[in-house]
Image (cartoon, helix red, strand yellow):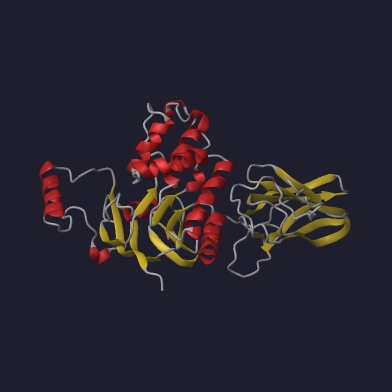
C-alpha cells in the first residue's frame, strides 16, 4: 500500500479585508511574541471555532475545513472557479503561506511552480538567470551544469541565451523560466496552471513533461488547471473546491463531470401556457422551444459527443398557410454556424410542431445559442425568436495527447483513411 506523503487536517485560511496587521504597533508586537516565541494561537487573528463555517466581520474564509490525503506517486488535479481557494491551498502546502487553523504534514522534497520566473533578473542574460533561478528553486550548481543544455533546448531560446532577458518577448521569458522549473527533481511537484505558459507548441512540451514526471518517474503531483481534459488525462484523482470548501474528491473523471455539470450555463426550455402570454404576433405565437441533450447518463455533462434534439411548437393563427421554420445556430460571439430550414408544410389554424437533432461529434467545444424563425411561403418572415436556447459544450478527447484549443467552429468525425503505402528496406552497406 502506498505511503501518505501529504496529509491535510481541518485546514482553514482566513484573510482580513483592507487591513494589514492589527492596527497598532503594541498589538502587532504582542501578536508576534505570542505566535512566534510562545508558539500559541494568534490572539488577534484566528478562527472562531464555535462558528468555523462563517467568516468574521471584515474577513474572508479562503479555505474551510479541508481534509485530504495524497499517496506517493499520485497525480491530483485541483479544479474550481477563480477565487475558489486553489492557489491558496498550494501556497500553504508549499509553506509559502501559513494556515489560520489546521495541520499540513508532508514527506519528501517539495518544489512549487506557482510563480513562473522566480529569481529572474532583467539585467542578466538567459544563461546567468538559469543558474540563479535554478539555485533559488533548489538545484545545486553541478546539477544545473548537468541539465543546462537540456533546459536551453526545452525552452527553445538557444539563439538568445547570452542576451539579457529584458530584451526577451514575454513568451520567451516564460518559456525559459518554466524550462528551469520543469527540470527540478522533487518528490512532490506542485504546479499552478501550467497551460497558461507560452504558445500552443510549448504547452504541448509542458504537458509532455508533466506526463513524464507523473507516469514515468512516479512522483507525486498536485496540478491546478482550468483544462478539464488535461486534468482527466494527467491526474488519477481530482479535488473540486468551491468558495474555499471541498465539494468533491475522487476519480478525476467523476469529479470533473460533477464540476462541469454544475457550472454549465444552459437555458434549455421556454414554455408559454396560452397564446395571450406567448411572444409572437397576430399570425403566429410561440408555444415552446426546448433543447434536450441525449446524455449517456443523467449526471454526464454536455460535451462534443452529446446529440442535441431541438423541439419547437407554435400556434398558427391563419386558416391555411404554407409554413416552415429555420434554426439558426450561433457561437457566443455571434458567428453563425448554420442556418437550417425545414421543408414547407401546409398548416391549418392550430398548434404546429417541429423537431431536429444535431448529431454528436459535430460541434466544437464552446458556448452557443439558437434562434428560431417562422416563415410563410418559404420567403416571408412571420416571427423571429432570437436567442431562445443557450447551451455550452465541453471538450472530450480520447487517445489524444494534445490538450490545447481544438481549431474550428465544427469538429466532425469524417473518416480519414491512413495506411502504409510502402516499406523502406535498408540496403546492405548503408
Question: Which quadrant of the view contains residue 103?
Answer: bottom left
Above or below: residue 83 compared with residue 292: above
In the displayed orientation, state which residue is furthest to the bottom. 1
Q: Nearer the viewer, residue 398 or 350?
A: 398
In this rendering, the count of numbered labels is 0
The residue shown at (39%, 46%) is 114
Of the 4 image quadrants, the one containing the N terminus is bottom left
x and y percentages locating residue 334 in the rendered image: 66, 42
x and y percentages locating residue 18 in the rendered image: 28, 43
The residue shown at (52%, 55%) is 211
The residue shown at (84%, 45%) is 380
* Residue 24 appears in the figure: yes
Above or below: residue 299 compared with residue 209: below
Above or below: residue 340 compared with residue 116: below
In the displayed orientation, state which residue is furthest to the front. 429
x and y percentages locating residue 318 in the rendered image: 84, 55
Answer left or right for 229 relative to 286: left
Q: Nearer the viewer, residue 408 or 46?
A: 408
Answer left or right for 371 relative to 72: right
Q: Nearer the viewer, residue 47 or 155?
A: 155
* Residue 313 appears in the figure: no
Of the 4 image quadrants, the one containing the C terminus is top right
Above or below: residue 404 compared with residue 235: above
x and y percentages locating residue 56 in the rendered image: 26, 55
Q: Nearer the viewer, residue 158 or 71?
A: 158
Answer left or right for 293 relative to 95: right
Amino acid at each position: 500500500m502506498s505511503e501518505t506523503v501529504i496529509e491535510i487536517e481541518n485546514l482553514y485560511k482566513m484573510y482580513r479585508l483592507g487591513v494589514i496587521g492589527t492596527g497598532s504597533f503594541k498589538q502587532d508586537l504582542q501578536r508576534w511574541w505570542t505566535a512566534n516565541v510562545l508558539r500559541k494561537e494568534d490572539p488577534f487573528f484566528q478562527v472562531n471555532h464555535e462558528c468555523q463555517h462563517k467568516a468574521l466581520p471584515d474577513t474572508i474564509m479562503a479555505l474551510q475545513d479541508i481534509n485530504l490525503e495524497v499517496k506517493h506517486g499520485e497525480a491530483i488535479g485541483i479544479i474550481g472557479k477563480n477565487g475558489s481557494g486553489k492557489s491558496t491551498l498550494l501556497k500553504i502546502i508549499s509553506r509559502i503561506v501559513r494556515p489560520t487553523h489546521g495541520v499540513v504534514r508532508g514527506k519528501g522534497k517539495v518544489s512549487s511552480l506557482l510563480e513562473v520566473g522566480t529569481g529572474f533578473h532583467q539585467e542578466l542574460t538567459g544563461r546567468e538567470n538559469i543558474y540563479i533561478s535554478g539555485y533559488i528553486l533548489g538545484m545545486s550548481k553541478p546539477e544545473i551544469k548537468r541539465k543546462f543544455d537540456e533546459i536551453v533546448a526545452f525552452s527553445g531560446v538557444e539563439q538568445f541565451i547570452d542576451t539579457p532577458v529584458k530584451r526577451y518577448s514575454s513568451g520567451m521569458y516564460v518559456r525559459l523560466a518554466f524550462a528551469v522549473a520543469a527540470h527540478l527533481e522533487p518528490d512532490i511537484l506542485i504546479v499552478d496552471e501550467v497551460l497558461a505558459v507560452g504558445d500552443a507548441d510549448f504547452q504541448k512540451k509542458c504537458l509532455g513533461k508533466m506526463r513524464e514526471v507523473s507516469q514515468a518517474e512516479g512522483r507525486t503531483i498536485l496540478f491546478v488547471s482550468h483544462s478539464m481534459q488535461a486534468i482527466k488525462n494527467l491526474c488519477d484523482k481530482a479535488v473540486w473546491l468551491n468558495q474555499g470548501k471541498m465539494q468533491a474528491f475522487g476519480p478525476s473523471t467523476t469529479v470533473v463531470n460533477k464540476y462541469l455539470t454544475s457550472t454549465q450555463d444552459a437555458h434549455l426550455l421556454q414554455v408559454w401556457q396560452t397564446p395571450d402570454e406567448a411572444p409572437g404576433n397576430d399570425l403566429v405565437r410561440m408555444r415552446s422551444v426546448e433543447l434536450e441533450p441525449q446524455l449517456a447518463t443523467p449526471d454526464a455533462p454536455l460535451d462534443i459527443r452529446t446529440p442535441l434534439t431541438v423541439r419547437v411548437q407554435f400556434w398558427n393563427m391563419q386558416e391555411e398557410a404554407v409554413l416552415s421554420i429555420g434554426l439558426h445556430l450561433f457561437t457566443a460571439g455571434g458567428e453563425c454556424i448554420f442556418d437550417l430550414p425545414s421543408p414547407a408544410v401546409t398548416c391549418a389554424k392550430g398548434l404546429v410542431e417541429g423537431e431536429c437533432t444535431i448529431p454528436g461529434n459535430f460541434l466544437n467545444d464552446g458556448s452557443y445559442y439558437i434562434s428560431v424563425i417562422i416563415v410563410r411561403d418559404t420567403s416571408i418572415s412571420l416571427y423571429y425568436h432570437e436567442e431562445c436556447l443557450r447551451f455550452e459544450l465541453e471538450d472530450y478527447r480520447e487517445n489524444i495527447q494534445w490538450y490545447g484549443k481544438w481549431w474550428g467552429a465544427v469538429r466532425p468525425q469524417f473518416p480519414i483513411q491512413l495506411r502504409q503505402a510502402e516499406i523502406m528496406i535498408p540496403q546492405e552497406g548503408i
